[in-house]
Amino acid sequence: MLIRLDANSPEPLFAQLAASVRGAVARGELHAGERLPGARDLAESLGVNVHTVLRGYQQLRDEGLVELRRGRGAVVTGQAEEGLAHLLDLVGQLVTQARRIGFTTDELVTLIRTEYR
């Protein structure tokens, strides 16, 4: 799992870190039961304060995507993979609806890109 942070982004670093972990789960790079890097090690490798990493991990914990276990660190939960399954279901519904109203693939992609910004 590769975590990249952009110091020039208006999004806080802890939120970028949490988004990176969410993305890794969505891409299948992280699975339920896997441990995330230790907060101190990750902070050192990213060049950020350890509290930034802990805040990102706490955000993921509050969302139910990781469990913070004393002595074991942050562990990905099964709920993280359920979130991906839910997203895939929503995408399927979106594609079905787009076809129903006559959208082309390019029109749907353009709509998604516009909304995603």
Image (tube, rainbow, N blue to C red):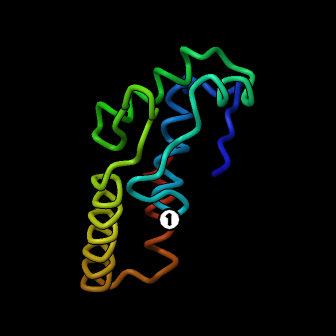
Disc 1 on helix, strand or loop? loop
Count of numbered labels shown in the rendering: 1
Image location of residue 71, percent across then percent down: 44, 28
**Drawn side of residue 69 relative to residue 54, left or right:** left
Q: Determine which quarter of the picture holds residue 43.
A: top right
Q: Residue at left 26%, top 63%?
A: 86
Q: Residue at left 50%, top 30%?
A: 15
Q: Residue at left 63%, top 52%?
A: 1
Q: Which residue is mark 1?
A: 28
Q: Residue at left 38%, top 56%?
A: 32
Q: Is residue 116 above or below residue 92?
A: above
Image location of residue 101, percent across then percent down: 26, 81
Q: Determine which quarter of the picture holds residue 84.
A: bottom left
Q: Is residue 103 above or below residue 39?
A: below
Q: Determine which quarter of the picture holds residue 17.
A: top right
Camera-side residue: 116 or 9? 9
**Drawn side of residue 67 relative to residue 35, left or right:** left
**Drawn side of residue 18 relative to residue 96, left or right:** right
**Drawn side of residue 62 relative to residue 51, left or right:** left
The amino acid beneath tag 1 is Gly
Image location of residue 93, percent across then percent down: 25, 74
Camera-side residue: 99 or 24? 24
Crowd class of label 1 (few under 14; some 14 to 19; many from 20; radius 10 Å):
few
Image location of residue 23, percent across then percent down: 51, 52
